[in-house]
Image: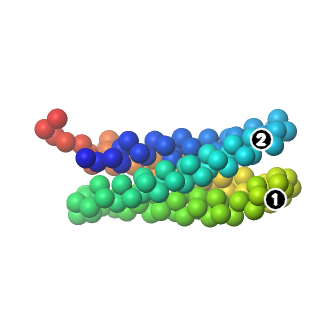
Amino acid sequence: MDWHPFIVHYPIALLSLSPLCDLGALWLGRRAGHHLAYGLLVLGVLSATAAVLSGNAAATEAWEGPAAEPLATHDSLATWTLLLGLGAVLGRLPLHLKGRLEGWPLYAWIGLGVLIGGLVLWTGYCGSELVYVHGLGVRADG
């Protein structure tokens, strides 16, 4: 069974919601919102790992044919999203451990989170094109 279509919705939701929580925490002046955003980022990266692994397993037969180029784009975007997310999780951890959730370091990590959120949406868009335009993962026999 191909688990990729079930798994991909988690990183899309979690990695998009994380920077929104950070921005909301800044706007409302609530420190706890930054901890929530970080937790969502961690869960998003874990689910992105599962999505990349399941996507690689599902795409083994699709590398030959007309969808190879869009599949390569989707694969590259997914890999970059995962790597940047992992970097953000590890890089932002000291801020949370030391309780220094203020100033330019926090703003820089929030900026990276916004970039990751945009990247995961772009990755999802490219993945949807693989399904709805190229028919990857769609069985003709029902």
Residue 73 lies, with reference to residue 16, above or below; the image says below
Residue 16 lies, with reference to residue 42, above or below; the image says above
Q: Residue at x 56, y 49 (%)?
A: 43
> In the rendered structure, which amino acid carries the disc numbered 1?
Lys
Q: Examine the rendering and report whether any part of residue 114 can be seen.
A: no
The location of residue 21, given as percent across then percent down, is 70, 40
Q: Examine the rendering and report whether any part of residue 124 can be seen.
A: yes
Q: Is residue 60 left or right of residue 5?
A: left
The location of residue 55, given as percent across then percent down, is 36, 55
The residue wearing badge 1 is: 98
Whole-angstrom CA distance, mark 1 to mark 2, is 14 Å
The residue wearing badge 2 is: 32
Q: Is residue 101 left or right of residue 61?
A: right
Q: Residues within 10 Å of mark 1 (few under 14, many from 20)?
A: few
Q: Secondary structure at mark 2?
A: helix
Dot 1 or dot 2: first in sequence order is: 2
**71 vs 16, nearest the viewer:** 16
- Residue located farthest toward the left when viewing the structure as drawn: 141
The location of residue 29, given as percent across then percent down, is 85, 39
In which quadrant of the rendered image does the C terminus lie? top left
Q: Residue at x 43, y 46 (%)?
A: 8
Q: Secondary structure at mark 1?
A: helix
